[in-house]
Image: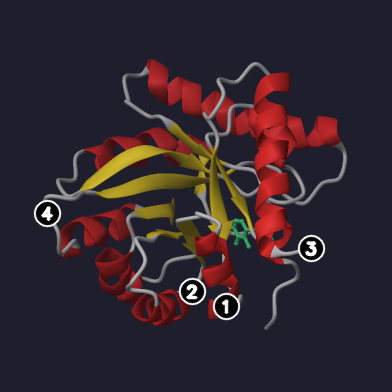
Amino acid sequence: MSIKDNLLIIGERIRKAENKYGRPAGSVQLLAVSKHQPLSALKAALQAEQLAFGENYVQEMAEKAAQLTAYPIEWHFIGPIQANKTRQIAALATWVHSVDRLKIAERLSKQNPYPERPIQLCLQVNISAEPSKSGVAAEQLLELATAVSALPQVQLRGLMAIPAPEDDFAKQRQAFAAVRDLFERLQAQGFPLDTLSMGMSNDLEAAIAEGASMVRLGTAIFGARGY
Ligand SMILES: *Cc1c(COP(=O)(O)O)cnc(C)c1O
């Protein structure tokens, strides 16, 4: 299967899930997660009109961006963030999904070289099922969202989560429902959020069922990652 075929199949899966779970057609955006994929793979996706790419490593994103300046790519940073990497991220990424502490958001805001273009942010939440250390705890979310919303050169758009891998559909949904609940509570408190970044190759249907607006797919598009 070519990358183009994979993108067609995934587009179909997304449309079917939108339809099945009562989501408006076209309400779920596809982010192509290209970490550890060669430039040729990104070019194949670009030729199939995929323009939004997610990367986890700053150096890798910078190297790819430098070689793909001819394309109108929208870079999304989705990996853990060290404070000393924020300047590079701010210079390259349109979106950052993995903000989990105020210091990082403050630095991105201060270091954004294009003040007329606020960096679009999601707060990564650590729901209880999540084994990784990344993500803000649910109890700290409101405080973080309030502080991030006050920063001038970033715009808070929503939440991101990476639930623990799980093959059971009902359990996948349960984890995503917990994220959705946090999202809706923030909306009810007046935060103008419109983005729920959740769902990967193995659980995108469950994520769409629970309101995902952006699914982040790597393997399903590009195949296994080369390291
Ligand atoms: C690698 C990665 C993905 C893509 O995972 P696949 O299982 O290959 O679809 C999505 N989100 C994040 C944060 C990732 O690190």
Q: Amino acid at mark 1?
A: Ser
- Specify the farthest residue to the front: 47
Badge nearest the viewer, 3 or 2:
3
Q: Which residue is mark 2?
A: 57
Asked whether residue 155 appears in the rendered view, the answer is yes
Image quarter where the N terminus lies is: bottom right
Left or right position of 39 against 140: right
The local secondary structure at tag 3 comes to loop
Q: Which residue does the image show at 68% across and 21% down from the upper left? A: 19
Q: How far, Cα to Cα, is label 3 from label 1?
A: 15 Å
Residue wearing tag 4 = 115
Task: Report the amino acid beneath label 3.
Answer: Met
Check contact, mark 2 vs mark 4: CB within 8 A. Answer: no
Q: Nearer the viewer, mark 2 or mark 1?
A: 1
Q: Which residue is mark 3?
A: 1
Residues 61 and 96: in front is: 61
User: What is the x, y in percent for residue 160?
Assistant: 51, 44
Pointer 3 or 2: first along the chain:
3
Front-most of residues 142 and 73: 73
- The residue indicated by pointer 1 is 40
Q: Are marks 3 and 2 in contact (CB under 8 Å)?
A: no
Residue 118 % position (x, y):
21, 49
The answer to which of marks 2 and 1 sits earlier in the sequence is: 1
The colour scheme is: secondary structure
For the residues labelled 1 and 4, the Cα–Cα distance comes to 33 Å
Q: Are marks 2 and 1 in contact (CB under 8 Å)?
A: no
Q: Quadrant of residue 87?
A: bottom left
The residue under the point 61% across, 75% down is 37
Q: Amino acid at mark 4?
A: Pro
| Earlier sequence position, callout 1 versus callout 4 | 1
